[in-house]
Image (tube, grey):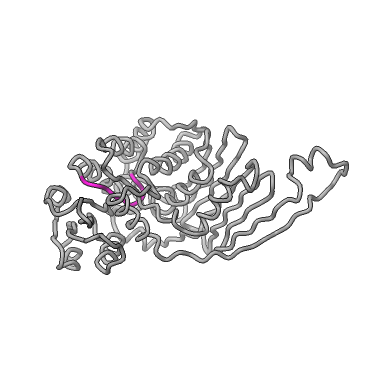
Amino acid sequence: MSKTVRLGVIGVGAMGARHAEQILAGAVPRCELTAVCSQIPEQLARFPQTRQFERSEDLIRSGAVDAVLIATPHYSHTTIGIDALRNGLHVLVEKPISVHKADAERLLAARKNPQQVFAIMFNMRTEPLFQKIREMLTAGELGRLQRVSWTVTHWFRPDAYYASAPWRGTWAGEGGGVLLNQCPHQLDLFQWFFGMPQRVRAFCHFGKYHRIEVEDEVTAYLEYDSGLTGVFIASTGEAPGSNRLEIAGDNGRLVAEHNVLTFTRNEVPTSQFNRLTKELFPTIPTQTTSTTIPSFAGQHMAIVRNFVDAILDGAPLIAPAAEGIRSVELGNAMLLSSLQNRTVELPLDGAVFEKELQRLIAKSGGA
């Protein structure tokens, strides 16, 4: 095997161009940017030192790349990803892996060769704060989990954002709103921490704050057979907004906000104290520790480096593509629950949501 990975970036808009520029600058050892693809000449002109393609099909079949990073609009993640996998390339796809679960299943099924590395850009998994939370949960430091709430309303977007392109904020062009565009990372982390729930009941508001078709505010309730319950709140119409994760367990409460992780630990587990105390209005003694955990600026390139290491060395992936379907399924379940005014059982039937989405697309004003 070659000692370097020849990488092509398909889609060099804002995010794809940033990835390509960092790779050209040497941010990823043993990775060479050999091709870029865009239908917009001005975007291609930024990369005169690489081979340029207007069609993804031509880049994929060029022989110039061993792997591709797909950073195109959401719907094409599926079609381009399937094409690249069927042609033997390694694939790293930007989030979300697909717009809906049925498409994600089609994309995952296209990987026939287990030697092909297939990953998703869940860069927040490299954030030290979230790694610490997962470490604590895996170690059982909170004991039996009881409740989780995550408020993610710091994604404020003005009308100008949605007016910047005709596909934004439409079912036909984007396929969803805050759940699909802004919150895939939080939905991924939610299932990374707690696993998938068994039931979802959600209330989505469509175009509540903006002149758009898709959801710009969501409140969802999630139930687990273990007894854990969760609330997930997201919005692009709130300012200043919050990003606060609170986890309650038998051993205490963990709060993450503003890069500070605060653990209020019960000196006696709640369940034990509940059985033994004779007091009528007791307070469980606690000890509180707070730790500031700085952000990691190199999240995206850490995922690309891991992708390259997996190709060349067989390193385990931080974010395997097979796990990308879970955040899509959570978002789809929330939308379906609201659209059909019912509790949705998981696993979600992807065909049911796809049918509902096609109905919305048929009425969509976007392209």
Query: Foreground residue, 302 or 256?
Result: 302
Q: Is residue 152 magenta?
A: no
Query: Foreground residue, 189 or 367?
Result: 189
Query: Foreground residue, 35 or 354?
Result: 35
Q: Which residues are magenta?
A: 89-97
Question: In the shown orientation, is residue 47 left or right of residue 100?
Answer: left
Q: Position of residue 15 (x, y in %)?
A: 31, 60
Q: Is residue 32 above or below residue 86?
A: below
Residue 5 found in image quarter = bottom left
Q: Position of residue 40 (x, y in %)?
A: 18, 60
Q: Position of residue 316 (x, y in %)?
A: 37, 47
Question: In the shown orientation, is residue 54 left or right of residue 314?
Answer: left
Q: Is residue 68 above or below residue 326?
A: below
Q: Position of residue 53 (x, y in %)?
A: 13, 56
**Residue drawn at point x = 69 percent, y = 44 percent:** 250
**Residue drawn at point x = 17 percent, y = 60 percent:** 34
Q: Is residue 92 magenta?
A: yes
How many numbered markers are drawn? 0
**Residue drawn at point x = 69 percent, y = 49 percent:** 252
**Residue drawn at point x = 63 percent, y = 44 percent:** 147
